[in-house]
Amino acid sequence: MLTRRVIVCLDVRGGRVVKGVNFVGLRDVGDPVALSERYELEGADEITFLDISASAEERATLLDVARRTAERLFIPLTIGGGIRTVDDVARALRAGADKVSLNSIAVQHPEILTLAAERFGAQCVVASIDAKRDGDGVYKVWVKGGREETKLEAVAWAEECVERGAGEILLTSIDRDGARTGYDLELTRAVTRAVNVPVIASGGAGAPEHLVDAVTKANADAVLVAGILHDGLTTVGALKAAMRDAGIAVRESIARTEAA
């Protein structure tokens, strides 16, 4: 049985973890290094570190913070935000990332997906897609931290990303982000049916059953969680226990033993 992953997302701005609703109203929730360690001990399978203002501000990602985070983790780390070239991908990997998330730059220059996959392997390349339903009910791709709408349709763009070399899709519903009403199952299901690489459901987790639904009803390979953990409403271990009770295979939550 395929094991599903629980991934904790750290949206970082100015070196601090922040969280908002629908990509706005951001508030400080803590230090990325300390939170990463806590979530690893709780049983997180991976950490995703997104410098959410880097692309909009046209600057490089905060690699020093990413490096300090990576140095303390034993689980995979994905870094994204402000990646503009294949050399930036290399720098992120050298800073300790196992995978690199590409969003705005992939829309502007899709060839970066292919170049990165050829140089580092598709397993290192995550196509991050922020999608929002427009007035006609079409899921459109947004870039620059959800600030700018594009003409791209989300499912078609996901297919193109995979064709160009992406080994994984991080799919975020802007409409559901921070609302805690559940993942957008229609969007997630459409993408999982369209591509043959793992799809991470993101945006909307508010209760354990939302994670269960993303897997059982939309076939997500992984679920991304943020706000409900940052606010102390639950733990990674509790979420995994609920998934296990629902018949979903998850990795055991084994706390890391500190070296003496």
Image (cartoon, grey):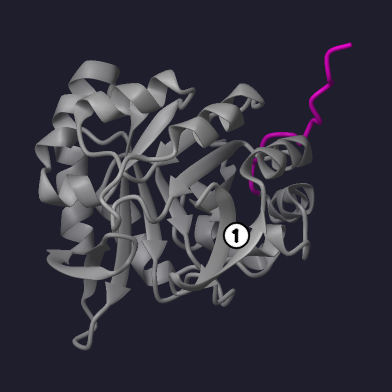
- The correct choice, above or below, for 61 with respect to 13 in the image is above
- The correct choice, above or below, for 128 with respect to 83 in the image is below
- The correct choice, above or below, for 98 with respect to 176 in the image is above
Q: Label 1, on which residue?
A: 211
| Location of the N terminus (image quadrant) | top right
Q: Could you tell me if residue 219 is visible in this image? A: no
Q: Which residue is drawn at 12% across and 50% down?
A: 108
| Location of the C terminus (image quadrant) | top right
Report whether 154 appears left or right of 215. Answer: left
The type of residue carrying mark 1 is Leu
Nearest the camera: 248 or 201?
Answer: 201
Q: Identify the magenta region.
A: 248-260
- Is 259 one of the magenta-colored residues? yes
Q: Residue at x 29, y 58 (%)?
A: 56
Report whether 144 appears left or right of 199. Answer: left
Which quadrant of the structure image shows residue 184? bottom left
- Is 1 one of the magenta-colored residues? no
- The correct choice, above or below, for 170 with respect to 111 in the image is below
